[in-house]
Image (tube, rainbow, N blue to C red):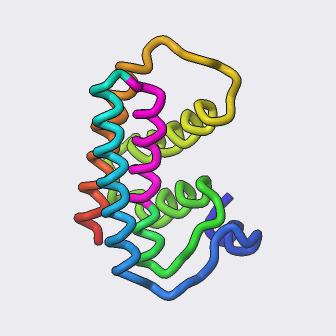
Amino acid sequence: MNINDCLLEGLLKKDKPSLDKARSSLDMAKHKLEIAEKEHDNEIYEGSIISVYSSMFHSCRALLFKDGFKERSHYVVYVYVKEKYFDKFEKGYLNELNSMRLERHELMYGLIKSKEGYEVESESAISVAKYFLEKVKSII
């Protein structure tokens, strides 16, 4: 799937470019990152991972707002950023975005209660979310 497919399927919509919405999305990304850090510190690792993904999502969503698009799917945010901004991110980071999207989905809707390693995963994911927030700020 690419951006044109997303547009044709209605998963991505053209909108008026908005730096205000982009900045608001970055503010939300920062807020979600702060929540993730507090959850991690309080050993709420599954919640931390979900909040980390929310931070990454809002960071990347800011790029869509800046460019004049609205998403209708979390996957579309990944597709858009990967296609339009691939050269702006260090190798592997965009795959982390998609991995965290899938992890968040499993945590929210899956049937597995807990998984060993969430503490380490949460800590690592927080550093990835910080990278996304700073990278997108520098692009905007």
Q: Which residue is nearer to you in this view: 74 or 27?
A: 27
Locate residue 98 relative to residue 28 in the image: left or right.
right
Q: Taking 40 as reference, is 105 above or below it?
A: below
The C terminus is located in which quarter? bottom left
Query: 37 or 96, which is in the foreground?
Result: 37
- Total of numbered circles in the picture? 0
In which quadrant of the rendered image does the N terminus lie? Answer: bottom right
Q: Position of residue 74 (x, y in %)?
A: 59, 55
Residue at the spot 55% in from the left edge and 33% down from the top edge: 103
Q: Is residue 112 above or below residue 140?
A: above
Residue farthest front in this picture: 42
Q: Residue furthest bottom?
A: 16
Q: Return the residue nearer the eye: 16 or 107.
A: 107
- Residue plotted at (43% across, 58% down): 58
Does residue 129 appear left or right of residue 102 in this picture? Answer: left
Residue occupying image coordinates x 50% and y 38%? 100
Q: Residue at x 45, y 39 (%)?
A: 96
| Left or right of 132 in this view: 82 | right
Identify the image quadrant of residue 124: top left
Compared with 52, 133 (above or below) is below
Image coords of residue 61 (percent x, y) = 46, 64
- Which of the 4 quarters of the picture holds residue 107? top right
User: Most prominent secondary structure in the magenta stretch?
Assistant: helix
Magenta part of the chain: 44-60
**Residue 45 painted magenta:** yes
Asked if residue 88 lies in the magenta stretch, the reply is: no
Residue projecting furthest to the right: 9
Q: Is residue 87 above or below residue 125?
A: below
